Image (cartoon, coloured by chain):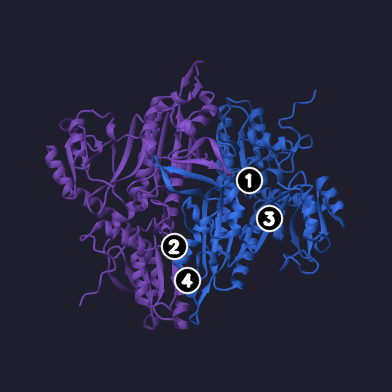
Chain colours: A blue, B purple
Amino acid sequence: MAKAPVLTPRADDFPRWYQDLITKAELAENGPVRGTMVIRPYGYGLWERMQQELDARIKAAGARNAYFPLFIPQSYLTREAEHVEGFAPELAVVTHGGGKKLEEPVVVRPTSETIVNEYFAKWVQSYRDLPLLINQWANVVRWEMRPRVFLRTTEFLWQEGHTAHATYEDARDYAARIHERVYADLMVNVLGIDVLLGRKTRAERFAGAVNTLTLEAMMGDGKALQMGTSHELGQNFARAFNTRYLSRDGGQELVWQTSWGASTRMVGGLIMSHGDDSGLRVPPRLAPVQAVVLAIKGDEAVLAKVREIGDRLAAAGVRVEVDDRTDTPFGRRAVDWELKGVPVRVEVGPRDLESGTVMLARRIPGGKQPVAADALAALLPAVLEEDQALLLRQSRERRESRTADVATVGEAVEAASAGGWARIPWSDLGEAGEARLAEHAVTVRCLVAEDGSVPEADDAPGNVAVVARSY
Amino acid sequence: MAKAPVLTPRADDFPRWYQDLITKAELAENGPVRGTMVIRPYGYGLWERMQQELDARIKAAGARNAYFPLFIPQSYLTREAEHVEGFAPELAVVTHGGGKKLEEPVVVRPTSETIVNEYFAKWVQSYRDLPLLINQWANVVRWEMRPRVFLRTTEFLWQEGHTAHATYEDARDYAARIHERVYADLMVNVLGIDVLLGRKTRAERFAGAVNTLTLEAMMGDGKALQMGTSHELGQNFARAFNTRYLSRDGGQELVWQTSWGASTRMVGGLIMSHGDDSGLRVPPRLAPVQAVVLAIKGDEAVLAKVREIGDRLAAAGVRVEVDDRTDTPFGRRAVDWELKGVPVRVEVGPRDLESGTVMLARRIPGGKQPVAADALAALLPAVLEEDQALLLRQSRERRESRTADVATVGEAVEAASAGGWARIPWSDLGEAGEARLAEHAVTVRCLVAEDGSVPEADDAPGNVAVVARSY
């Protein structure tokens, strides 16, 4: 008789597999208020590593962290017309504070462009103050009708960057820099997720932006997930908040702005990109735990050995954890580490002590082999890099093999419904075709140029629309 | 004619000096919603360094980070009677979400004991799951009637630890461990702030705790600031949320709990501990910028030299910034770095290039002296450690010289009103005396044992009450 699977197989029911994995790997749970989530320590550990890697890249791009209030006066939201139209349906509103009804209700920030601009307008005086490059790590709230843990939650954690520049070109280049050197670099080189870099159509742009750059990834079921966005805001918010600077030639000019964000949604993307029927597979460069050293049995010699190996791996720079909880059966612990997707398991039992070997189990390619205990520390860095590369390759191969070139809206819907992406010339599709796709819950994920680069404009000749179902 | 002071002198008006400093050093501003604050990059940099140092200590104490939702159902708050009584007057309430009135209003977390316990009750099954040691970094909201930036704000940032243990002793020891090895170690050895470790009286305890351990620091004006607290919660929340575990002998037992927090209030404490009439003085171990290398003039050789020195100091492990903004007058930039309290300024002008020296200005002891440029990298680490020690010594000397032993409530009020602390035997003061002090806005900051240690109980023989005005 076959073992009962730990998770609902992906092929049977992908959404249920996703939910099973999140629960069993102890990543998160639903919160008591609809759409909120509790991020458990192992899930938060993934987010913390994303934060560290992202924060370093944001700082390297010259931005500095700051913090703006959670509560925004309702009146701020209404100053930029498209912005309020986009966010009004999703707002949480505080009407009472300190036991009294508030004179003006305040909204819980859904994003911070408005309140940031209120202060940018004070801080920016002259061209010497530009560019002003700010980032904040924060929670935001957008009331969700169809919540799903990590992917779409009423409250989520993110970073949001906000910048002001003297010229259109400088703002455009900075938005592109974040898109490529911060987000794409993180996603490809740390998360091991192949992402398509493109430009959103007018219909899919951020509310208040003149251009939205996006990173789209193909999940295990062929749907798309937007992993992060970087917006050119033009002078829309500057106009609404009168954010002006004294130019070198003495005029008062409106600033040009960008904003950009990536969130805990990336954890969901990680799961759906790399997970398999045994659980998560965490890319080694990201993994909070790269290797776990397991004691198979609780005798003293084994326990001493796992601790010794743990120390040696830690000294070699491996993020390692020792699992000596031998009052829980070994098999159950092994399954648990598989669920959690720790790249490497080093299993040590009494017989290994005699032979001077350990069992090396690799989660990402799969398989087990005995390895000389003394060779482990020298071996692991290369093993981990190999596994990192494999995940990215698998992610890329999935996208390439499941993307079809099509010529009509009908073919595009068919490809998307079969669990893939379709490429169709934007000149053939257009906004009318985009509206027809929407009737089938298919959207244009992004526009890319003929050569695969990010187009300068929606209607640049040769633009291709990449369309798919999405999360 | 004397120069106009940069800040209101402390001796003239301490609260105004504090506000001046925060504004002019660009640490923070008031937010648009009353009581909220915008933390500017330099202020946030101080907080980020506190976070890094605190997070490392929390992890060393075995706790792992997680995240619980911002929104708590109103009904949760009411389950622990003292807790709701303490927090109800300060709550912000969300009544509308996604354009609709909510069925049950939700509160914005003022602290997370209730929602944490809802999940602890699920996660804790047996003694094997204990201790459960969780920390979260989050924003919390407590509606403030008399807000003051960093010290008392409607929204603030903090960490809150929440733990569950199998025994009373284990919980008590863990609360003490956080008190001493996490908080006191941070405050004394990184922030350079002398803190008194003690126990709160019943009147001053956290709402729902059976014991609150506190760290109290004396500010520049002789008032006290509570810098952090670590609570023993007993079984109060466990009872309210039915958080039980299967004991080794098969019984169902309530867990014993702790919670502990430190917040952006520490930034206020840092300012009021170390600031002087020229601005902030940041302890080097904390400082996001330990040394700034300033170009006095903008000629090429000087600019090349400041960059070279900057690189050499960075390579020597100094957190360094290069100030080559020579389109702003040197004097104004020097005053600005003084306001910001960067420990060391290295000033480089054309004449220094000839002599091979630079001017070394030390913010903490004050004074300037020429130093051979080549000797700087080797010299600075010792200079910074000397300055670190000086700040702690000054903080300690202030507390010692301004604390008086008194015998009566009248004398205690007099000492506190004169800008100092008073020590009075708790057996002489008692709860009746404590109530009389309160009429004069004087509170018992904490109880300490005769030998200076933290008492085991409120009424332990020899307990001394330390009383003061406070923030």
- Where is residue B160? Give x, y as percent: 44, 40
The residue wearing badge 4 is: A129
Callout 1 secondary element: helix
Q: Comparing marks 2 and 4, which lies closer to the viewer?
A: 4
Mark 2 and mark 1 on one chain? no
Subunit of label 2: B
B248 vs B197: above or below: above
Closer to the camera, A458 or A160? Answer: A458
Give the labeled residue for mark 1: A267
Foreground tag (3 vs 2): 3
In the picture, the quarter occupied by the N terminus of chain A is top right
Name the residue beneath numbered marker 2: B319
Residue B125 horizontal/vertical position (percent): 54, 24
Badge 2: residue crowd in 10 Å (few <14, some 14–19, many ≥20): some
Q: Give the residue displayed 29% in from the left and 55% down from the top.
A: B272
Q: Give the letter of the chain under mark 4.
A: A
Residue A188 badge: 3
Q: Nearer the viewer, mark 4 or mark 1?
A: 4
Label 4: which secondary element: helix
The image position of residue B267, as x and y in percent, is 37, 53
| Amino acid residing under circle 3 | Val
Q: Amino acid at mark 2?
A: Arg
Q: Closer to the camera: disc 3 or disc 4? A: 4
Please determine if labels 4 and 1 lie on a single subunit. yes
Give the spatial CA distance, label 3 vs label 4. Answer: 34 Å
Viewed as shown, does residue A348 lie left or right of B20?
Answer: right
Eye-nearest disc, 2 or 1: 1
**Cα separation between marks 3 and 2:** 30 Å
Q: Report in which chain the residue with disc 3 lies.
A: A
